Image (cartoon, helix red, strand yellow):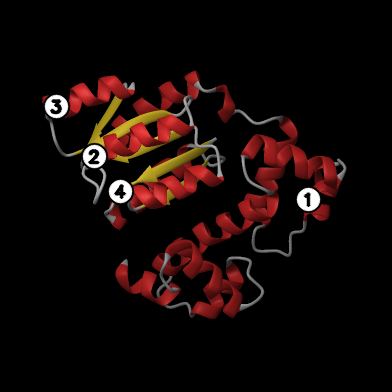
Amino acid sequence: MNVLLVDDEPLELEQLEYLIHPLFPYWNLYKASDSSQAAAVSQKVKIHLAFLDINLPGKSGLELGEELRQHNQDMEFIIVTAYQNFHYAKQSIRLGVVDYMTKPVIQSELVDILSKYRNKMPQSKYSHVIHDALTIIHEKYADKLALADLAAEVHINPTYLSRRFHDEVGVSFSEYLMQYRIQISKKYLIAHPEWSISTVSEKSGFNSQHYFCTIFRKSTNQTPKEFREKEK
């Protein structure tokens, strides 16, 4: 399932990702800090569930939700807010929001809310083949992992796996692998401040530090060093 996290506070985004990923490791988490980034993500992949902070720069989270709903009527929304305001509640009802979370996010509240979405959304359940493929990616992301290698391990044709992977996961195998490696590299950058950028790159599965830095900056709008310094 593709899940969009929208908040203009980087630490809030990181916390949501940190809490959600262990509970649902096969969900694809996309992050955006404003409405324009969120809209760009939703145009590239089909988002099934979006966490929207109400207080965003430019458009509010509710206005963003209305915009996203125009392009995807099936998208579900969870409002994340530090505010309790009747006007917001009325807008939320009109948008079809049925779940709210207050800041700071409490893990038990998040677990309770997401358990309801797991029951409501069969899209979160992958086929056996894709489940096995994702498990292998999560175990062997640091290796040289090609589509043909993955197909051989799950005993199906590479072309069929490629099509099936995109249909179920929402992105291609190569894009998912790259996104997963970037997520792993973020954890390494924070958890191992003694590691050089080259070491983080290698342990995350990138065979070139230059390529890693290029992809990291494209994904986060920061260099790995800037990300590490900001998260200290």
Residue at the spot of label 3: 87
Residue 133, percent from left and from top:
71, 43
Kind of residue sitting beneath label 2: Ile
Circle nearer the N terminus (2, 3): 2
User: Element at badge 4?
Assistant: loop
Rendered image: mark on residue 150: 1
Q: Quadrant of residue 100?
A: top left
Residue at the spot of label 2: 54
Kind of residue sitting beneath label 4: Asp
Which numbered mark, 2 or 3, is in the foreground of this view?
3
How far apart, in angstroms, are the residues tagged by discs 3 and 4?
A: 20 Å
Q: Residue at x 31, y 57 (%)?
A: 10
Residue 106, percent from left and from top:
26, 37
How far apart, in angstroms, are the residues tagged by discs 2 and 3?
A: 12 Å
Judging depth in this view, the residue of 192 and 148 nearest the camera is 148
Rendered image: mark on residue 7: 4
Q: Residue at x 34, y 47 (%)?
A: 35
10 Å crowding of disc 1: few (<14), some (14-19), many (20+): many
In the image: residue 46, left or right of residue 174: left
Which numbered mark, 4 or 1, is in the foreground of this view?
4
As drawn, 74 above or below 226: above
How far apart, in angstroms, are the residues tagged by discs 2 and 4?
A: 8 Å
10 Å crowding of disc 4: few (<14), some (14-19), many (20+): many
Kind of residue sitting beneath label 1: Leu
